[in-house]
Amino acid sequence: MSLTARQNQIREIADQTTGHRNTLEWKRQCYGKLSASKFGAALRLISVYDRERIQAVRESMYAPDDFHHLPSCRWHIDNEKAAIAEYSRRTRRVVKPTGIWLYQSDMMYATPNGLLYEHDTNHQRTGIIYVKCPYRMRDVHLQLAKDWHKYLDYLDEEDCLSHSSDEYHEIQGNMCATDSDWCDFVIWTPNETSIQRIPYDAEWGEHTLHILGNIVEDKLIRDEDADNTAMPMMYPSTDEKIHDLKHITHPRDSLEEQIRGF
């Protein structure tokens, strides 16, 4: 498949999965791939060989836990629309929902909160948005505007997003997947809203993304440090996934039944 054809396919999948989170097709597209939300966890595998950590990241690709019942997750889901509405009110930008953005390698994917347009979706897209609705701050009234970091460990002392945080790697991953130059990072609470512009880091796209690809291949799909292969190297088709994954995933009859268990 040519590069242009692959790019068109990626955009088509993003359009087709918009508004269809947790459907069978959504889970099918994510199955066996590393989410940008797990990039930080995957990068930590570089410093130490820990089979439990490797297995935890691997399970996020094949049988992720459902955290929707947790209060913190429910809080974010229930308030994400309010956060986006407040962002649009402040910036006058249009936020267009989007779906799953695959990478060229088909081993990773990103799910940004939305695509940004200056006036309407007929104009050229300008950036993307990433939203956090921290449960721990639901009742907080900040004493000072620069006090966000006292409650959120992904911010530094200047309230800027830490480059070592999982959120930073996810945002860079989202920008890389969507070919975006910047992302507006929104932190929303019932009482306060923070918006900061995160520029695309070209070095991250060239260096860190390459490292992530190696981690997925060498530690998550196959484990080079283990005595035997834990995962098949590549999954070119759904039929081959069904055949190859029977011995490593939950003992269910088909891929459809496996991914319904996400």
Image: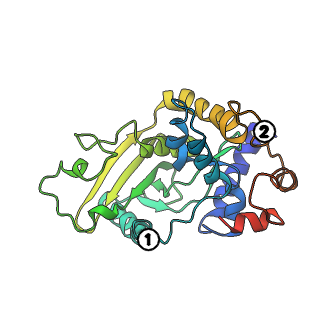
* Drawn side of residue 223 relative to residue 71, left or right: right
Task: Tell me: residue 132, above or below residue 204.
Answer: below
Quarter occupied by the C terminus = bottom right
Amino acid at the residue labelled 1: Arg
Residue 118 in sight in this render: no
CB under 8 Å between discs 1 and 2 = no
Q: Residue, x 40% and y 36% (percent of image)?
A: 164
Camera-side residue of 7 and 63: 63
Question: Element under label 2?
Answer: loop
Can you tell which quarter of the image residue 93 is in? bottom left
Marks 1 and 2, Cα distance to the nearest angstrom?
36 Å
Residue 137 appears in view = yes
Location of mark 1 (residue)? 74
Q: Point out residue 139 in the picture as x, y percentages from the top left corner.
A: 23, 68
What residue is rendered at 16% in x and 58% in y? 142
Residue at x 30% of width, y 62% of height: 136
In the rendered image, residue 5, in percent from the top left (x then y), is placed at 77, 44
Residue carrying label 2: 233
Coordinates of residue 52 in the picture (x, y in percent): 58, 45
Question: Looking at the image, which residue sits at the far left?
Answer: 143
Instruction: Say which quadrant the N terminus sits in.
Output: top right
The location of residue 67, given as percent across then percent down, is: 51, 65
SS at circle 1: helix
Q: Amino acid at mark 2?
A: Met
Task: Name which of mark 1 and mark 2 comes first in the sequence.
Answer: 1
